[in-house]
Image (cartoon, grey):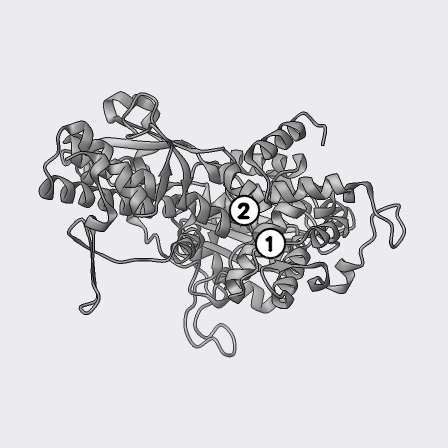
Amino acid sequence: MRAADLDIRKLLDVDARGGVVRFAGERAVILDAGALGTLREELVRLAGYAGARAVLTRFGVEHGARMAEAMTSRLAWDSEAELHGAGALLHTLQGFIRLAPGDTTPLASRGATLLSSYEAEQHLLHLGRADEPVCWMLAGIASGYMTRATGEAVYVIEDRCIARGDDVCHFQGRTRAAWGGALEEHLPFFRESALDPSLGEAAQPAPLRRATGRALGARASALPLAAPRGEPPTPLVAESPAMQRALDRARRVAPVDSTILLTGESGAGKERVARLIHGASTRAAGPFVAVNCAAITETLLESELFGHARGAFTGATHDRAGLFEAARGGTLLLDEVGEAPPGVQAKVLRALQERQVRRVGENASRPVDARILAATNRDLAADVAAGRFRRDLYYRLRVIEIRLPPLRERREDILPLARALLGAASRRLDRPVARFTPEAEGALERHGWPGNVRELENAVEHAVALAQGGAADLEDLPDDVRGAVPAGGEAGEQPAARTLEGVERRAILAALERHGGNQARAAAELGIGASTLYRKLRRYARGKG
């Protein structure tokens, strides 16, 4: 048997009456890719990026190993090389990937290149552009398959990914010895018992033991005020230098347990960046707890933050843990901390200094094990000078400050962010809206966005709700966005950015983004030849269009 002889018609067996589907002899189910993308989104929200990666990687290892077992037990292969090469073809037939011509296995010296990946596609749609490779399940599948096929533990790592802006996804597979020290940072995400039976629990790296010792699916908190919002998180888009600098600082400080102050206008994405920091930290497997200090009265805020004892006040019918305790092992975000009353400020300062809290109505203190992030849209330095905010608390919170620029200062991000929000809104509202018309995109670019990303998100949802057909048009946008006038222009004027060449460029780049950078598909959608598209892209790259 040769890998090239694999035929989907022979591998797939459907019993319509019995409701049983078998692939390569094994019971299988057919799942919608978008549903798997939603699952990924939920895993990231509940367990952080590290937890989601661990779950999906280990699931992939099991899937790949079972597929290799089916291949070796049911088919006679001409050679081991054919068995190894069958793995990538099998996963192509299953709809996971599209392999580059000539590539057969990640064990090859040049690795394996994917021209498309369902996992990268779904990550872009549900979570936006990534900072690191995110085809976690595919890496696990390849690892499990190659381990079972070769008889020795093989770890497949992705080093390029479409979801982070690379042209292709690229995987390299090696044994643990061959990887050497380069594998250490990836090991915690693999369940090693599935790859190397000689490694037991005691041999697992410390990060993995800590992660598996906690409930990866733990919700942010059982407390109502700490529960995460029901809607999907706003995607993080950073094409602009200002936002790239902010996210770069967030990524650099995430592994360190320092307190961070996030500043920026309302709706600029402070909570989203806080979740990114949590997901990239050593506490990612723990809960993420957020509380809005401006939304609660002083008495209730104190009880929510520090907890209370039974009988501490009218209505306190039982002991209750506060948010500092609920965030144990994870991250606590004090949103709008500048609005906290003076009495609460003093107690927050004490909790930060002593790493202990005292519930309302109790005399004993309890230890705190939570990383503290704070966010505000106020000028806290001015509030300190005016006596409205405690100076000592300000400096305790501002160990590291990350300022998030308003959307008007990161205009390069407007259209990429709007497109990502469009996909999320279309799924949420169950509407078949896949793109904006050039006229709608022009209005989005011209608007000043005083409400920042939150206003953009609402405008996109407005457009999706009103759109007729597959494209959101100018008339589908809110009135204030539709009537936006560019700075320095008069109503009815056409800015330079709206020239025919500018419209063409935006249409081409939007088509490429929809097709994950696949030039052939983008050209087909636009109705032009692939060579024409290539020439235009080269001209854009040289800065002439």
**Where does the image place residue 483, in percent across and percent down from the top left?**
80, 59
**Cβ–Cβ below 8 Å for labels 1 and 2?**
yes
**Where does the image place residue 397, in percent across and percent down from the top left?**
60, 44
> Which residue corresponds to mark 1?
435
At 9% from the left and 37% from the top, the residue drawn is 76
The quarter of the rendered structure image containing the C terminus is: top right
Query: As drawn, is 276 to the left or to the right of 74?
Result: right
Residue 257 in sight in this render: no
Asked where in the image residue 479 lies, by quadrant, the reply is bottom right
At 70% from the left and 61% from the top, the residue drawn is 477
Mark 2: amino acid: Arg
On residue 40, which mark appears? none
Q: Is residue 224 above or below residue 408?
A: below
Query: As drawn, is 498 to the left or to the right of 395?
Result: right
**Where does the image place residue 425, in percent across and percent down from the top left?**
56, 60
The CA span between labels 1 and 2 is 9 Å
Sequence order check, earlier mark of 1 and 2: 1
> Which residue corresponds to mark 2?
514
Q: Return the residue nearer the eye: 495 or 519.
A: 519
Mark 1: amino acid: Arg
